[in-house]
Amino acid sequence: MELRPIRTETDYQEALREIELLFNAAPNTPEYDRLDVLSTLVEAYENKHIAIAIPDPIEAIYYYMEIRGWSDRDLESCLGSQVKVSEVLSCQHSLTLEMIRKLNQELGIPAEILIQPYKSVKIPVEQF
């Protein structure tokens, strides 16, 4: 493939195929340099043409927990009690500003993800 701007989906797919072939190129080689340039071109194309949806706040919490090896109990420092952790993770309780701040600081979840509205489930209180 001739190095040129990626303008079409066909150009994009061709560049991805070549990146796959060059993926294990050794550093400081012409193949590695080509991989670097192609990766930059693909990234520019993706940033312009492929929208990446921001994840749901609760999905993001689960993701960040998983990559850090955290359990529900580890979230108590961010969300409060184990009951509150369970309520938040099951969408029965919305995140508060303080929870968002702690999740951002302790787990590194970007605030713009956590402040998004998400569907919470309200459980009716049974009257006796």
Image (cartoon, rainbow, N blue to C red):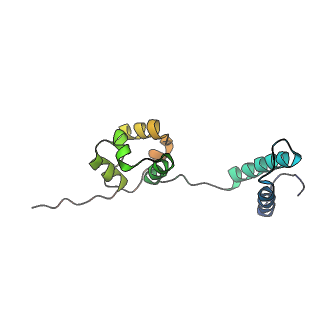
Q: Is residue 103 above or below residue 4?
A: above
Q: Residue at x 49, y 52 (%)?
A: 63
Classify the position of the N terminus by image quarter.
bottom right
Q: Is residue 63 left or right of residue 43?
A: left
Looking at the image, which residue sits at the far bottom? 10
Measured from the top left, where is residue 70 in percent x and y? 43, 47
Q: Residue at x 32, y 59 (%)?
A: 121
Residue 41 appears anywhere in the view: yes
Measured from the top left, where is residue 50 in percent x and y? 67, 56
Measured from the top left, where is residue 28 in percent x and y? 84, 41
Measured from the top left, where is residue 67 in percent x and y? 51, 49
Q: Nearer the viewer, residue 76 or 122?
A: 76
Q: Is residue 127 above or below residue 72?
A: below
Q: Residue at x 88, y 52 (%)?
A: 3
Residue 93 appears anywhere in the view: no
Q: Is residue 2 left or right of residue 114?
A: right
**Total number of numbered labels?**
0
Quadrant in the rendering for residue 19? bottom right
Looking at the image, which residue sits at the far right? 2
Looking at the image, which residue sits at the far left? 128
Classify the position of the C terminus by image quarter.
bottom left
